[in-house]
Image (cartoon, grey):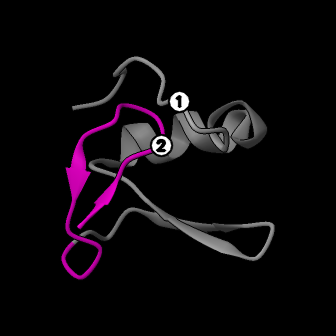
Amino acid sequence: MTKDPVCGMSVDEKKTSASVQHKGKTYHFCSPACRDTFGKNPDKFTGEKAGTHHGC
């Protein structure tokens, strides 16, 4: 399990289809909406704190 960097939800990286590569690291998301939010400004979400949930 990993944490969605946008909303903070736990995500099973083996089951999610919403994933992207950014600066050599793979990020996994709970939904396509969180993936799309991340894609608009990935550097905002690559820090230690998760943002608020805008997806599901």
- The quadrant where residue 43 appears: top right
> Disc 2 residue type?
Pro
Q: Give amino acid for label 1.
A: Lys
The quadrant of the image that shows the C terminus is top left
Between 48 and 40, the one nearer to me in the picture: 48
Q: How many marks?
A: 2
Q: Residue at x 40, y 17 (%)?
A: 52
Q: Is residue 12 above or below residue 8?
A: below
* 12 magenta-colored: yes
Instruction: State the image coordinates of residue 53 (x, y, percent, origin top left).
Output: 34, 22
> Mark 2 or 1, which is nearer the eye?
1
What crowding class fits label 2: few (fewer than 14 Cα within 10 Å), some (14-19), or many (20 or more)? many
The reply to whether discs 2 and 1 touch (Cβ–Cβ < 8 Å) is: no
Q: CA distance from mark 2 to mark 1?
A: 8 Å
Numbered range of the magenta stretch: 1-15
Q: Residue furthest front?
A: 48
Most common secondary structure along the magenta stretch:
loop
Instruction: Describe residue 42's horizontal placement relative to residue 38 as left or right.
Output: right
Tell me where residue 5 appears, x and y as whole percent: 47, 43
- Residue 41 position by quadrant: top right
| Disc 1: which residue | 49
Disc sitting over residue 5 in the figure? 2
Asked which quadrant contains residue 33, the reply is: top left
Q: Secondary structure at mark 2?
A: loop
Query: Can you say whether 38 is above or below 23 in the image?
Result: above
Q: Which residue is located at x 23 percent, y 67 percent?
A: 1
Q: Is residue 10 above or below residue 52?
A: below
